[in-house]
Image: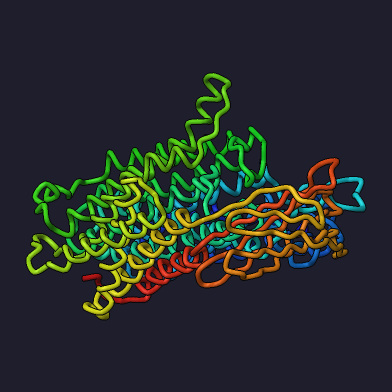
Amino acid sequence: MASLIGFYSLIFGLCLSFIIIFYSVRNFKDSMVFDNKIIFSTFLQFFFVIVSFLGLILSFVYSDFSNETVFNNSHTTKPLFYKISGTWGNHEGSLLLWLLVLTLFIFLFLIKSKDQSKKYRILTLLFQQVIIMGFFIFLIKTSNPFNYIFPIPKEGLGLNPILQDPALAIHPPILYLGYVGSSIIFSSTLAATSLNYISKEWAKHLKQWVLISWIFLTLGILLGSVWAYYELGWGGFWFWDPVENVSLMPWLALTTLLHCILVLEKRLTLTSWVVILSISTFTLSMCGTFLVRSGILNSIHTFANDPERGLFILIFLFCLIFLSLFIFFFFHKNNDKNVDSFFWLSKETSILVNNWFMMYFLSVVLIGTVYPIFLEVISSEKISVGPPFYNKLIIPFLIPFLLAMAIGPKLKWIKSDLQDKKYLILFFIISFLLSIFIIKILNINFLLNTILVTSAFYLFFITLRDFFTKKFKNLSQNISHFGFSLLILSILFNNIFSNEIITNLKVGETFQSEKFKINFENIEKRNDQNFLAIIGKLKIESLNGNIETLRPEIRIYNQPNITTSEADIKTNLLTDKFMTMNFIQNQDYFNIRYQVKPFMIWIWFSVLIISFGGLLSLLQKRYEN
C-alpha cells in the first residue's frame, strides 16, 4: 500500500508541474501581483514528493519485498537505522531524495524572495520546473522506486555492508542539499539574465543561496571523506577517487562564484563571471549525477550500470546547457567594461587572480576524472589517474595561490597599496625559517616542500593575526580563510609525518621495525544482528615505551554474503593510530596494516571552521567590507 501511494504521489507531483507552469505563464503576462495559487501549487507538489518519499521509507521499514527497490537493497535482519538510511543508499531512492530537495528549495525560494520582482520570481520558478519535470520523468520512466515484483520474495538481497554506516546515512542528504542548491542558483541566474535584472541587490539576494549550497556541499564532502577514512580502510582523507572528484568540482566552481558575488555586490562588475559560474556549478553537479548513475565511472561509490539512465541524463543535461548558453549569448548585457580599468593592486584584481587559480585547479580535476573515460572509448585502453598526476599539476600552483590568498584580503577596493605592511615581510621570513627547520629535521632535501610549507605557514600566520588586529571586521572571511590555512598545514604535516607498516602475522607472532613492535595476541568472535565479527587484539609498542592496544575487525555479513574490514582508530589531538586486518586466502596468516597519521583530527576540524565561516556570513545582514 505504501509503495502504491508513493508511486501515485509521483504522478500527481508531475501533473502539478504542468499546473504550476500554466499558472506561472498566465500570471507572468496578465497581472502585477504574484498569484498565491502558484505558491500553493508549489507547496502541494513538495507535499506529494514528501508523501512519495515517506512511502518508500515505510516500504523499507516494514521490509515490503514486493517493492523491487526494497528487495534489492534491504533484508529483514538489517537494523532499523540502516533500513531507513537504505532508502537513499541506492540509485532510485537517492534520485527521489534529489527530487525532494529540488521541490523544497523552489518552495523556500518563493517564500524568501517576496521583495524581488514578480517576473523574476516566476521566471526562476519556470526554469526550476523544467529541471523538476526532468527528474520526475527520469524517475518514473527509468528509475521507478516503486516497481512491483510478483511472486513476492520472502527475503531481500540486503544493502552493501560498506553503506551500513552512520556517517554515510547522513552524507547523501547533506551533499544533495549542496548539489541541488546549485539548481536554484542556476535558475535564478538565467531568470535575472533574461530580464536584465542583475544588480547589486540581486547579488545580495543570490549570495544567500550560494552560501547555503556552499555550506552543505562542504559539509557533505567532509562526511564522505570521514566515512571513506574509517570505513574503506585506506587510511587517508582523500584518494582522488572519481566520485570524490565529482563532488570537488562543483565545490571549486561554487567557491569561485562566492568570491565573484562579493565583487558584484560591491561594484556591479564581474557579471559575466557570475553567470558562467552559476551555469557551470549546476552543470558540474548534473555531470556528476550522469557519471555516477550511468556506471561509467569505475569507483567504489558507483550506484548503477544502466546505459538507458545515463543516456537520459546526458540528453537532459545537453538541453539544459544549450538553453543556458542561448540565454547567456542572446540576453546577457555585458556590464564588465570597467574590468579593464581594475588597478593591478586592488581587491577586485586579487579576486580575479583567485578565479584563475580556482579554474586551473578545476580543469586539472576535470581532466584527471574524464580523460580515462575518453581514452577507454577511443582506444579500449584502461588507465587510472591517481595522486601523482594531481600532485604534480596542483602543488606548484598551490604555492602562489596561498601567497595571493594571504595578501589579497589586505587590499582595498578600487585601488590599494602595501604601505606599512612590514609585517607581511616579517611573517614570510619567519615562515621560511620555520619550514627550513622542519624540512631539515626530517632530512627531506626537496626545494618544493620547503616553499610549500613556507607558503602554508605564511597564510596561517597572516590569517591568525587578523583575529587580533581586525577583531570583528570581516569575521566570517577571516574564519574561513584561517580554516583553509589550517587545512593546508594539517594536510602537509599529515603527508610528511605519516608512517605505515604492512605485514603478515599469525596469532601469537611479533613484528619488529625500527619504530614499532607489533604483537598479535589473540582473536575473538562475536555474533551481531546481521554479521559475524572476527576481532583481533594487537599491542603496539613504540620506541619511547608507549603501549597501545588496537582491535581491528573482519566482518562477515549474512546478506549479502560479503566480508569487510573494519579499522580500529585511536585518536588524540596530534595523531591517529589506524589499524586494519584482512584474511589471506587459504593461510593462517592475517594481513596487518598499521598507520600513524598525524593531525587527522585537525583536517576534519579545519573543514568545520571553513563551513562555520560561511554560516556566519549567511547570518550577517550587512555587506562584506
Q: Is residue 517 visible?
A: yes
Q: Position of residue 491 (x, y in %)?
A: 44, 57
At a point 21% along the width and 78% down the height, the residue shown is 469
At a point 37% along the width and 74% down the height, the residue shown is 616
Query: How many tags in the picture?
Result: 0
Q: Is residue 146 visible?
A: no
Q: Which quadrant would the N terminus be assigned to in this image?
A: bottom right
Residue 287 relative to residue 543: left or right: left
Looking at this view, is 311 or 117 the one in front?
311
Looking at this view, is 292 or 96 the one in front?
292
Q: Quadrant of residue 296?
A: top right
Q: Position of residue 161 (x, y in %)?
A: 75, 54
Q: Position of residue 620 (x, y in %)?
A: 33, 76
In the image, residue 375 above or below residue 83: above
Residue 199 relative to residue 568: left or right: left
At a point 38% along the width and 54% down the height, the residue shown is 254
The image's colour scheme reads rainbow
Residue 150 relative to residue 7: left or right: right
Q: Position of residue 351 (x, y in %)?
A: 23, 55
Question: Which residue is outermost to the top?
Answer: 379
Residue 229 relative to residue 614: left or right: right
Looking at this view, is 599 or 473 the one in front?
599
At a point 64% along the width and 34% down the height, the residue shown is 308
Q: Which quadrant would the C terminus be assigned to in this image?
A: bottom left
